[in-house]
Image (cartoon, rainbow, N blue to C red):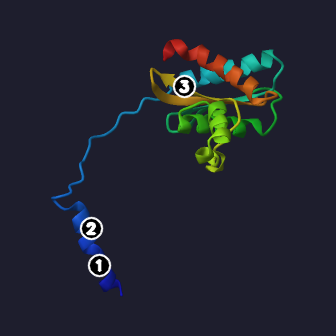
Amino acid sequence: MKILLAAFLMPVTLWALGPENPTPITGPTTERNVSLDMALAAAQAAVADCTAKGYLVSATVVDASGVVKATVRGDGAAPHTPNASRRKAYTSASGRNSTSAMLATSQSNPAAQNLGEIDEFLLLGGGLPIRSGTEVIGAIGVSGAPGGPLDEQCAQVGLDKIKESL
C-alpha cells in the first residue's frame, strides 16, 4: 500500500515543483519590533495613569509577533489582569487593530462574528497596536479598569509615552 501511495503522490509533487511552475525563493525578511525599553516605558506609563485614576490594572506589551516583551502588574491588581492584558495585546498585534474596533467588527459583520473564538484572542477594549509609521511593531494591552474604554485610555497613555521613539 505504501509503495502505491508513494507512486501516486510523486507525480503530483513533481508537477507542483516542476520547471513549468517554479516556486520562487525570496531572501530573508526584516521585521521591526518594539524594544524592551519602549515596552517597559509604555507598560509602566499605562499602569501609572490607571493607578492615578484609582484603577488597579496590569499592562502587557508584545512584539510584532505577539510575544511578550514586558508585563507590569500594578499593586492590588486582580490576579486575572496580567493574562487578560497579555491576550488583549496579542489580539491587537495579531489583528493589527485596536481590540475595541475588532469587537465592533465582530458584532456588526457576520463574516467576523467568530473572531473571539481564535485561541488567545480577547475582544474587549484595552488593546492598541504600536505603530512605527504604518507598520505594526507591537501592541499594548491593559486590563483591570472598570470597562474596556477606560483600559484603552490608559493604554493610549502608554503609547503617548513612547511616541517620540517610534
Mark 2 residue type: Thr
**Earlier sequence position, callout 2 versus callout 3:** 2
Mark 1 residue type: Phe
Q: Residue 151's x, y, as percent?
A: 73, 26
Q: Which residue is mark 3?
A: 130
The span from disc 2 to disc 3 (Cα, nearest Å) is: 42 Å
Nearer to the camera, 126 or 27: 126
User: Closer to the observer: label 1 or label 3?
Assistant: 1
Q: Residue at x 54, y 39 (%)?
A: 94
* Left or right, 100 with reference to 30: right
Secondary structure under tag 3 reads: strand
Q: Residue 13's x, y, as percent?
A: 27, 67
Nearer to the camera, 52 or 40: 52
Say if 122 sits above or below 74 in the image: below
Q: Which quadrant holds residue 16? A: bottom left
Q: Residue 148's x, y, as percent?
A: 74, 29
Q: Which residue is mark 1?
A: 8
* Left or right, 19 with reference to 65: left
For disc 2, the neighbor class at 10 Å (few under 14, some 14 to 19, many from 20) is few
For disc 1, the neighbor class at 10 Å (few under 14, some 14 to 19, many from 20) is few
The span from disc 1 to disc 2 (Cα, nearest Å) is: 9 Å
Q: Residue at x 73, y 18 (%)?
A: 48
Secondary structure under tag 2 reads: helix
The span from disc 1 to disc 3 (Cα, nearest Å) is: 49 Å
Q: Residue 156's x, y, as percent?
A: 64, 20
Residue 13: which disc? 2
User: Closer to the observer: label 2 or label 3?
Assistant: 2
